[in-house]
Image: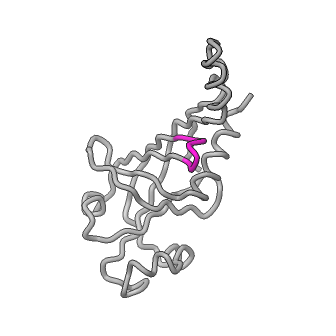
Amino acid sequence: MTDHAEIEAKFWKALKSDMTFMIGLAGHDDPQPMTAMIEREGPGPIYIFSAKDVDLVRKTATGARAVATFTAKGHTLFAGIEGDLVPDNDRATIDRLWNPHIAAWYPGGKDDPNLQLLRFDAEQAQIWLNETSLLAGIKSFFGQDPKPDYKDKTATVKLAS
């Protein structure tokens, strides 16, 4: 039996580890892969370093509703996430999150004029665990219904802190 808190904890741990998710604006067909940066495994904002000339950034100049999808490595967890995406060039946050991988994209460093930090205030997620796929496959092979094994492996969770 898996409870919602355990499913949510697995989501944050996987996102912090794997980092890449697809994010786009609600109601638009423009999701794109971005690197999700979180400071802890738990409720809190998801940060994205991007460039001011990226379509997604231009469309969120004053903030917008966004949706994201996440697939953990090994396909052990899937999530659909909803929230607000807003520009947030807080220098203290940039300093905390800055690393050599980010620096490689911005020749002007933290003061690069094209640098844009976005904050995704994730409010809710639908999360699916896929931990029993091998067992489900074996059960299906022998004619058994695998659906009962998945009934406790999904949750809709509120993510806002």
Front position in the image: 132 or 30: 132
- Image quadrant occupied by the N terminus: top right
Residue 116, image quadrant: bottom left
- Asked if residue 91 is positioned above or below residue 13 in the image, the reply reads below
Task: Tell which residue pokes out farthest to the front in this image.
Answer: 141
- Residue shown at the point (65%, 39%) measured from the top left: 7
Foreground residue among 5 and 128: 128
Q: Which residues are magenta?
A: 72-78
Answer with left or right where residue 57 lies relative to residue 129.
left
Confirm whether the magenta stretch covers residue 73: yes
The percent coordinates of residue 87 (x first, y second) are: 37, 64
Q: Position of residue 121 (x, y in %)?
A: 47, 53
Would you place residue 158 above or below residue 17 in this image? above
- Color theme of the render: one colour
Please state if 132 lies on the left or on the right of 72 as rendered. right
What count of labels does the image hold?
Answer: 0
> Does 49 lie within the magenta span?
no
Extreme residue toward the bottom, this view: 108
- Which residue is painted at 61% across and 25% down in the image? 137
Q: Nearer the viewer, residue 161 or 72?
A: 72
150 relative to 57, above or below: above
Residue shown at 56%/61% (left/top)?
38
